[in-house]
């Protein structure tokens, strides 16, 4: 049983080491909102979300005050909108209307973000899927808190290269549509392979069709706590190092479990999963890169970085699964460049390149995340980078993702300021050799042989 004494034990973590519950995410099914009339559909969506989520922010704030645990974000995820809007939407503009409805209701209930402006196209695209994808630039440029994700591959189905090629163009168009805000729209767009149904983290969250009508998922984060714990075992062998990470991850997850259970009980919504992800912020001392340095590297990107990250990711998961019966989502260490001061420093020092980041994604959560690239990068090159990352996920049976930001009007050597949790990023160079003929082939890369397990 979880009791208040376990929370008291973590007070120092909260006060001095940046431990927080990164998000309470309320997942809401919109399948019962489907209607062939667009006006009726939008009304149904607004009413369902408002009635289900109207007490979410208030409840999160109450729990935070009572237990002294910072809960940074309150968020909503919904059923992939390509499924919900298929009967009513006949154009990209119709889908964008739904995005504006999501934005309006999210602001009405006071949440930070709403995710689920999504399509699942790992094997092929329906007309509705294509229309939603084509609407993304307008949807993300005309809303403030809507997040979008597209799943273009999986270990079971292979990689839909038609969708990959299209997403290269959509990323570039979204950058153009939001160029007055340093192409910020791309920070709200993720391309996935093996997207989980129960991810509480934006921008990739959506409410999977296998989920209940509504569900509470909690995302916990504590890079600063892990780093502080490792400082106390500096110079010890790998066995001691691993045990320290596991024990720390256990304590962090227990805090999340307490918050999840309280939120579930007070809102009358079933508890889904705890996502224990070491998700950094721009705050000093809240960096995954700093953990890698504490393990023994001069800088993130140095030789040994991939091995150190693999060790960290595995021990975090081992500690987490002992603390909760329902660990899910993405769970592991995130390496978003703009959101991690240590990563930014490594890029600026020349220790960390795009290619090294790609290698690191083989062993950590998610993938190439929050990376600013030159605004004149061709959309075919963006598609090629997406394809590479999707291949890593497909072959390794893991979730991978790409969140690239081609900053229109800026190039290598410049920086872009996003603000808040999104931080700032140096614009990274991209390989200039062409992959046009490859990404323009069309069709699907088949699933790997080890996908046939049934």
Image (cartoon, rainbow, N blue to C red):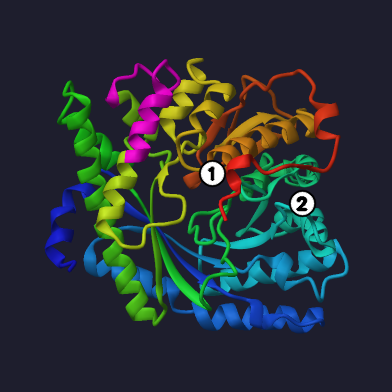
| Residue 24 higher or lower than 193, as above or below | below
Q: Residue furthest front?
A: 454
User: Between 354 and 364, which is closer to the camera in this rendering?
Assistant: 364
Does dot 1 land on a helix, a strand or a loop? loop
Classify residue 300 by image quadrant.
top left
Residue of label 2: 137
Residue of label 1: 397
Does residue 159 show up? yes
- In contact (CB < 8 Å): disc 1 and disc 2: no
Does dot 2 land on a helix, a strand or a loop? helix
* Residue 295 colored in magenta in the image: yes
Residue beneath the point at 80% across and 22% down: 434
* Residue 60 colored in magenta in the image: no
Residue beneath the point at 31% across and 35% down: 285
Q: Is residue 148 left or right of residue 108?
A: right
| Residue 328 higher or lower than 450, as above or below | below
Classify residue 281 by image quadrant.
top left
Q: Tell me the magenta residue range.
A: 294-314
The location of residue 254, given as percent across then percent down, is 25, 58
């Amino acid at each position: 049983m979880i009791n208040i004494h376990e929370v008291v034990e973590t007070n120092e973590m909260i006060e001095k080491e940046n431990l927080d519950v990164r998000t309470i995410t309320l997942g809401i099914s919109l399948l019962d909102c489907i209607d062939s009339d667009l006006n009726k559909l939008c009304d149904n969506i607004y009413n369902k979300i408002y009635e289900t989520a109207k007490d979410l922010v208030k409840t999160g704030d109450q729990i935070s005050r009572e237990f002294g645990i910072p809960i940074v974000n309150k968020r909503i995820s919904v059923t992939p909108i390509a499924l919900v809007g298929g009967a009513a939407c006949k154009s990209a503009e119709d889908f964008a209307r739904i995005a504006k409805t999501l934005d309006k209701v999210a602001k009405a209930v006071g949440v930070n973000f709403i995710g689920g402006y999504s399509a699942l196209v790992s094997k092929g695209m329906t007309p509705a899927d294509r229309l939603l994808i084509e609407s993304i630039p307008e949807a993300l440029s005309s809303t403030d808190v809507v997040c979008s994700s597209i799943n273009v591959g999986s270990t079971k189905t292979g990689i839909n290269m038609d969708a990959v090629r299209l997403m290269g163009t959509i990323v570039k168009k979204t950058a153009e549509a939001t160029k007055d805000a340093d192409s910020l729209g791309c920070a709200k767009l993720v391309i996935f392979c093996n997207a989980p149904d129960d991810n509480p983290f934006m921008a990739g969250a959506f409410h999977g069709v296998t989920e209940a009508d509504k569900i509470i998922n909690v995302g916990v984060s504590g890079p600063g706590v892990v780093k502080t714990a490792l400082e106390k075992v500096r110079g010890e062998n790998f066995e001691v190092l691993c045990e320290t990470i596991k024990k720390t991850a256990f304590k962090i997850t227990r805090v999340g479990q307490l918050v999840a259970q309280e939120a579930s009980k007070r809102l009358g919504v079933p508890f889904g999963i705890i996502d224990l992800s070491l998700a950094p912020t721009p705050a000093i001392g809240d960096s995954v890169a700093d953990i890698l340095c504490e393990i023994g590297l001069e800088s993130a990107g140095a030789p040994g970085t991939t091995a150190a990250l693999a060790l960290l990711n595995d021990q975090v998961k081992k500690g987490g699964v002992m603390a909760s019966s329902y660990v899910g989502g993405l769970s592991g260490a995130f390496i978003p460049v703009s959101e991690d001061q240590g990563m930014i420093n490594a890029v600026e020092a020349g220790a960390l390149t795009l290619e090294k980041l790609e290698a690191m994604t083989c062993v950590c959560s998610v993938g190439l995340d929050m990376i600013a690239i030159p605004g004149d990068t061709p959309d075919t090159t963006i598609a090629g980078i997406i394809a590479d990352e999707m291949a890593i996920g497909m072959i390794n049976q893991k979730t991978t993702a790409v969140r690239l930001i081609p900053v229109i009007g800026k190039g290598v050597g410049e920086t872009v300021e996003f603000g808040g949790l999104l931080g700032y990023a140096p614009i990274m160079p991209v390989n200039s050799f062409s992959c046009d003929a490859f990404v323009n082939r069309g069709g699907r890369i088949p699933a790997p042989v080890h996908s046939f397990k049934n």
